[in-house]
Image (tube, rainbow, N blue to C red):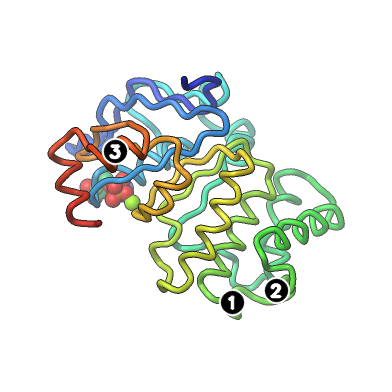
């Protein structure tokens, strides 16, 4: 089935000193696919995400985006970062800039859009994540769920080919989790290619094309949510699921 590959990791290995944090990782994310990555804390999920937009280097193997190797540095690297948006657990908004300015900033600096054009696009995106009325506020005036939606709008503003989410709802109060997941569901339905590290199994069941289960730096299972949740093959996955479900 999996078709037109957008992100490909081939035999990727990475060490932190003696720790073999990514071990022989092979993973293909097709265009328009949503891949959820789950696994115990410390299994390498964040590191994997960070290698995909080159926030981390790899020791061996290769990573291709749209058929091309990831650039090592310079302008090409900045372009890559714009093509693969990342949304973190902590929203990382600029505290002293308005919501609108947060969403416009990289459009102006990296995409070289004029302010007017950037702001227009920002307002469209803020509307799309349900925050049209919050554009002139500062991040601290918003709830965590609203701030995370701003972070998503900011990532979308670069017209990325793919979005990476690293536990985007883990820092949120429970009542704010759904508003963020709903925005992500909507993006998935619109065909955005997404890699999502999350423990939100409802999201995985309803939005993911595949679930990748990691433990100790390895991909242990890579299957449809249906297969994974009804009949996990590995003891590790069964054990993990019994703890979180
Ligand atoms: P996860 O996101 O699955 O919890 P991480 O990718 O954050 O796992 O971390 C995987 C392992 O790598 C952990 O043992 C962590 O302590 C270690 N690690 C992560 N980042 C670094 C770093 N910059 N230097 C050294 N060790 C690190
Ligand atoms: Mg992590």
Q: Which mark is residue 228?
A: 3
Q: Quadrant of residue 152 in the image?
A: bottom right
Element on which disc 2 rests: helix
Give yes or no for contact between labels 2 and 3 (Cβ–Cβ under 8 Å): no
Whether the residues at callouts 3 and 1 have beta carbons within 8 Å, the answer is no
Residue 172 x/y as whole percent? 43, 69
Residue toward you, 237 or 56? 237
Q: How far, Cα to Cα, is label 2 from label 1?
A: 8 Å
In the rendering, at what x and y percent does residue 194 appear?
Answer: 51, 41
Residue at 26% across / 41% down in the picture?
Answer: 230
Point out the frontmost of discs 2 and 3. Answer: 3
Residue to which mark 2 is pinned: 134
242 vs 75, left or right, is: left
Along the polypeptide, which appears first: circle 3 or circle 1? 1
Q: Distance between the residues labelled 3 and 1?
A: 37 Å
Tell me, yes or no, whether the two marked residues, 2 and 1, touch with CB atoms within 8 Å: yes
Q: Is mark 3 on a helix, strand or loop?
A: helix
* Position of residue 158 measured from the top left corner of the image (x, y, whole percent): 68, 45
| Residue at 50 percent of width and 23 percent of height | 64
Q: Which residue is drawn at 72% across and 65% down?
A: 100
**Which residue is the extreme one toward the bottom?**
141
Ligand 2 within 8 angstroms of badge 1 C-beta: no
Residue 11 in the figure: left or right of residue 89: left
Q: Earlier in the sequence, mark 2 or mark 3?
A: 2
Tell me which corner region of the image, top left, top right, bottom left or bottom right, holds residue 202.
bottom left
The residue depicted at 74 percent of the width and 73 percent of the height is 133
In this view of the protein, which residue sits in the foreground, 78 or 125? Answer: 125
On the rendered structure, is 152 left or right of 124? Answer: left
In this rendering, the label closer to the viewer, 3 or 1? 3
Q: On residue 142, which mark appears?
A: 1
Alpha-carbon span between mark 2 and mark 3: 40 Å
* Crowd rating for badge 1 (residues with CA inside 10 Å; few <14, some 14–19, many 20+): some
């Amino acid at each position: 089935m999996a078709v037109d590959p957008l992100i490909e990791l081939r035999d990727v290995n990475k060490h932190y000193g003696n720790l073999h944090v990514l071990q022989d990782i092979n993973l293909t994310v097709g265009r328009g696919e949503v891949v959820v990555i789950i696994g115990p804390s410390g299994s390498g999920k964040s590191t994997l995400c960070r290698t995909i937009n080159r926030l981390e280097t790899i020791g061996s193997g290769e990573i291709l985006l749209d058929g091309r190797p990831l650039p090592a540095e310079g302008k090409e690297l900045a372009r890559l970062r714009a093509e693969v948006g990342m949304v973190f657990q902590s929203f990382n908004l600029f505290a002293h800039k308005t919501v609108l300015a947060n969403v416009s900033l990289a459009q102006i600096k990296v995409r070289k859009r004029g302010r007017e054009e950037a702001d227009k696009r920002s307002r469209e995106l803020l509307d799309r994540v349900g925050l049209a009325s919050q554009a002139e506020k500062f991040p601290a005036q918003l709830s965590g769920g609203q701030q995370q939606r701003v972070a998503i709008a900011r990532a979308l503003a670069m017209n990325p080919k793919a979005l990476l989410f690293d536990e985007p709802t883990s820092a949120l109060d429970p009542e704010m989790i759904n508003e963020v997941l709903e925005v992500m569901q909507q993006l998935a339905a619109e065909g955005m290619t997404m890699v999502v590290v999350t423990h939100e199994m409802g999201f995985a069941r309803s939005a993911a094309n595949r679930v990748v289960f990691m433990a100790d730096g390895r991909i242990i299972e890579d299957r449809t949510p249906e297969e994974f949740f009804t009949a996990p093959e590995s003891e590790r996955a069964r054990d993990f699921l019994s703890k979180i479900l």
